[in-house]
Each structure stands twice: as structure tokens, then as C-alpha cells.
Amino acid sequence: MSVLPEAPPVRHGLCRLTLIIDGTEYRLSRSPTARAAWHLKKRSGPRAGVTYCVLTHKNVVSCTCHDSIRGGAVCKHVRAMVACGLVSKRAKPEAVIVAQNLATATTPGRGESHA
């Protein structure tokens, strides 16, 4: 008759994912509703407690922060998430797509005839 060895004890603990951008701490968590979304809760500095959402959909990444929505910039949140490998480098920031579409729409000679 063989005797199985005892299973090793299971260690329990807490883990937390924190991202520090320019000295400002953000607590990261996965969105419970969107598979490719992260919530970044600002833990320090001005506007502490504000939560931003970085979402990737069909290789386009967007953020709900002021710089991204109103300023049309590729924000520090998206750049940091890409740098850490939490967002694919292949995902194109929404601000870049908007700028490209505006440039294409305002460039003369694209499908227009000027006689």
C-alpha cells in the first residue's frame, strides 16, 4: 500500500497592482464589465480618488482622462500602460486615429476635383 505525501500548505496573501507615473500613484484593477479595460484610480496628488478607464477594442486604445478626451492627446495613462505591457504595442491610440482622419479630411485633392 502506497502513502501519498501531504500536500504543501497553501499560502494566502494580498496583492495589488500599482502604477507610478511622474511620481503620481495609481491603483490598477481590471474592469469587471470589459475584458480589455483597466481602471486607474489616482491615489495621490491633485484630484486624488479620480478613476480613469483605459480600454482597448479592435486594436484601438482610449482613455477617459481630460487630456485624451478634450485635448486630443495620447495621454500618459495609455503610454504607461503600453510601456508596462498591460496594453499591446500594436494598439493604436484613439487620438492618433482622430488626428489622421482630420488630416485626411482637410487635405485638398483627396477625392475632390478642383477645376
Image (cartoon, helix red, strand yellow):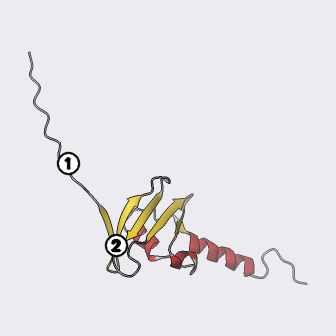
Q: Which residue is mark 1?
A: 12
* Classed neighbour count for the residue bearing mark 2: other residues with Cα under 10 Å, few (<14), some (14–19), many (≥20): some
Q: Viewer-proximal residue, 8 or 82?
A: 8
Say which quadrant the C terminus sits in. Answer: bottom right
Find residue 29 and report its horizontal and vertical position in percent.
38, 60
9 shown above or below 113: above
Amino acid marked by disc 1: His
Residue 96 % position (x, y): 58, 74
Callout 1 crowding tier (Cα within 10 Å): few <14, some 14–19, many ≥20: few
Q: CA distance from mark 1 to mark 2?
A: 25 Å
Can you give x and y, in whole percent of width and height, for residue 102 in the image?
68, 77
Regarding residue 105, the answer to whether it shows in the image is yes
The answer to whether residue 90 is visible is no
Q: Residue at x 56, y 81 (%)?
A: 71
Above or below — where is 64 with respect to 106? above
User: Which amino acid type corresponds to the residue marked 2 in the rendered image?
Assistant: Arg
Please name whichever residue, 109 or 106, is drawn nearer the observer in this view of the structure: 106
Residue located beneath label 2 in the image? 43
In the image: residue 15, left or right of residue 65:
left
Counting residues from the N terminus, which is met first, the one under dot 1 or under dot 2?
1
Q: Residue at x 50, y 74 (%)?
A: 65
Which residue occupies 17% across, 46% down?
11
